[in-house]
Amino acid sequence: MFRRLSLMLCLAALSFSTFADPASDIQRLRAKLLEGFPAYSPDSITPAPMTGWYQALYGTQVIYISVDGRYLIQGVVMDMHDGKRNLTALATNQARKNYMQEVNAQTPLRFGAEKPRHTVTIFTDINCTYCRKLHNQMDSYASYGIAVNYLMFPRKGLDGEGYRKAVAVWCSADREKALTEAKLGKEVEAKDCANPVAEHYALGQKVGVNGTPAILLEDGTLIPGFVPPAELAQQLDAAR
């Protein structure tokens, strides 16, 4: 019985691989998703690692939909055959990596190592306690060969004190000095100028930032919260 079932499953998989038309499936599934969720359009739909399923990306959020469009799964998918790989996390990291071109196109505030072994992008809020703790250890990050590109992420949005402080820092003659003083609790003269703070904030939302500090690695991994210098260096070395 089990041999017969195994043969039937193999034939079903062969049938699927022979007759599947990914372009047609994607077009049909996109229409199905828009029908079910008209306010949201998927950024991409691609075959999932599991036979008979596709994965749709909304920003960095991954959902899985069956090829017939009947079933939808939102959650973590693990590959138990290959070292218990988290397939959802890999897809999410790749989605963030796709945004890295946008991240790298921004003009950051740069600190840390002058000749870095690693470069990270950190979304920061001036009033955030752990952001200040991280910044106070910048010399230690530099000693591990880590450069930090700061992008502004005022946690309370674009109409709060954090946003106004971020703009004041950006519009200062010496931005790096102004940021350090602001993180020490010193007052920064209120100024206004053309600035990318709103763009930084929007980009942070795209890559899934919902708190600060948020550390974005070059491979698309997003680490929420403060990470001590030695631990961050260890993680970066392991990711190489």
Image (cartoon, grey):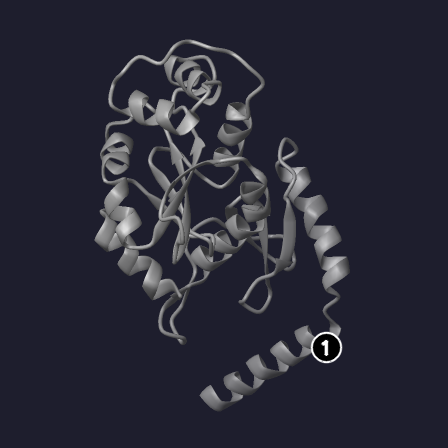
Q: Nearer the viewer, residue 11 or 136?
A: 136
On the rendered structure, is 36 left or right of 164?
A: right
Q: Indicate the position of residue 65 as horizontal and vertical percent values.
A: 58, 54
Asked whether 224 or 240 is in front, the reply is: 240
Q: In the displayed structure, does residue 119 sit left or right of residue 59?
A: left
Query: Quick one: SS at disc 1?
Result: helix
Vertical order, 164 against 174 (above or below): above
Q: Where residue 239 sits in the image (x, y, percent)?
A: 38, 63
Of residues 149 and 235, which is closer to you in this image? 149
Residue at image position (77%, 59%) is 24
**Camera-nearest residue between 187 and 1:** 187
Residue depicted at 26% across the width and 43% down the height:
139
Q: Is residue 218 above or below residue 174?
A: below
| In the rendered image, the vertical position of residue 103 relative to residue 15, given as above or below | above
* Residue that label 1 marks: 18
Percent across and percent down for residue 9 are: 56, 80
- Residue 123 placed where, x, y %? 41, 35
Left of 224 or right of it: where is 198? right
Residue 226 shows in the view: no
Name which quarter of the figure residue 186 lies in.
top left
Q: Quadrant of the C terminus?
A: bottom left
In the image, farthest residue toward the bottom: 3
Q: Residue at x 29, y 56 (%)?
A: 233
The amino acid type of the residue labelled 1 equals Thr
Within-10-Å neighbours for mark 1: few <14, some 14–19, many 20+: few
